[in-house]
Image (spheres, rainbow, N blue to C red):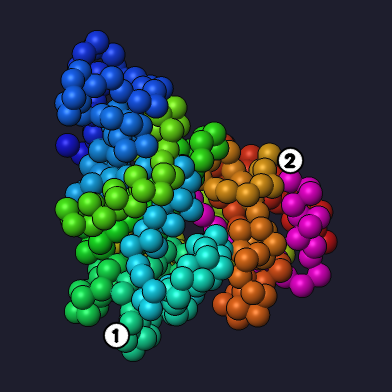
Amino acid sequence: MKIESLLIHGGIDGDERTGAVNVPIYQTSTYKQPKFGVNKGYEYSRTGNPTREALEKLISDLEEGYRGFAFASGMAATTAVLSLFKSGDKIIISNNLYGGTFRVIDKVFKNFEIKYKIVNTSNLEEVRKNIDERVKAIFIESPTNPLMDVTDIAEVSKIAKEFGILTIVDNTFMTPYLQKPIKLGADIVIHSATKYIGGHSDTVSGLVVVNSKELGEKVHFIQNSTGGILSPFDSFMLIKGIKTLAVRMDRHNENAKKIAEFLRDREEIEKVYYPGFKEHPGYEVQSRQAKGYGGMISFVLKEGYDYKKFFESLKIITFAESLGGVESLVCHPASMTHAAIPKEIRETIGIVDNLIRLSAGIENSDDLIEDIENALKESK
């Protein structure tokens, strides 16, 4: 089954008992047991719930993995994956990883003596030379948030396998519609499903997919033990959002390309970060490992232009946290999504104060470009 059909019919398709087209919301915390030691497959909704299970099977199908898991947020999903490691372990992380991921590693897991090393994972030699006996995983985003660096997932996965360590990929920007890290050799895929997977800025959620029975058992144990599960209602909402992922991502891709090309020619813009430009250093890898360039763009205003005035002058595009909704969203990474990263690290890698991140929605592209053009004029 092609992915456009799998988005609608994958996982558990409908309800066999009643014939309902949609999986019902099983809004229950517990389940009646017919007799001692016997149940109907469910005991308690932290451990398993039919609506959440339908979502988990669906994301596993979409990512072509072994087993999927649904969590209360993207950070809950990330926290569960990081809980696979123990004191003394070290994780290599991409050098402009999402700020929330950096924060939980740096401020929480560091307390348990889990170390990290920041590496430019686009440079395979840098990855290889930073692996020592303590490194247990390589955690990457591709493209990265917000500078759109591209990592060769297949090659990093090969290196990881040489050393017997895990490859973890945050696939939030691409979604399984555009990129499938497990097929490229990754062991674990993470999504902030709040973003493109849900797609409507109405549900906070996270997803994890693993490539083996062993990892599945470990992640399920952590999910059940720590309890950061997704509710039945939010699971239903996410299944609903997934059904339109293909048509939404096609439009996100189309609009982002048009906006990026518009920005590239503007005198107010110093630099545009977009992996769909042929001159982007990761263009060839991105073209090979994904079937699109995504809906995300970052750009730097030239000196003399006021980014605060730019944000305040927008009429259609919403100035807000998050990304991946049907509506276009714009944010200021240095003070919002990546504020947890120390200023000296931010500026070294390019997250400067006049950097703007844009999530292209599915509105009319001419309206979006006109809105940006007007805001650029007002920013002088």
* Outermost residue toward the top in this view: 18
User: Alpha-carbon neighbours of circle 1 within 10 Å: few (<14), some, or many (≥20)?
Assistant: few
Q: How many marks?
A: 2
Q: Amino acid at mark 2?
A: Lys
Q: Residue at x 23, y 57 (%)?
A: 215
Q: Secondary structure at mark 1?
A: loop
Q: Position of residue 313 (x, y in %)?
A: 78, 48
Name the image quarter holding the N terminus: top left
Magenta-highlighted residues: 295-314
Q: Is residue 303 above or below residue 173?
A: below
Q: Residue at x 19, y 49 (%)?
A: 66
Between 64 and 364, the residue placed more toward the observer is 64
Q: Residue at x 56, y 68 (%)?
A: 107
Q: Position of residue 153 (x, y in %)?
A: 30, 67
Task: Check residue 133 in the rendering and tell me which mark sits there, or answer none.
Answer: 1
* Outermost residue toward the front in this view: 36
Task: Give the mark nearest the N terminus, 1 or 2.
Answer: 1
Tell whether 239 sits left or right of 254: left
Q: Amino acid at mark 1?
A: Glu
User: Circle 2 is placed at which residue position?
Assistant: 315
- Using the rendered image of the protein, determine whether residue 47 is visible from the camera's viewpoint: yes
Please identify the quarter of the rendering in which residue 52 is found: top left
Q: Residue at x 36, y 70 (%)?
A: 86
Magenta segment includes 299: yes
Tell whether 304 sits left or right of 44: right
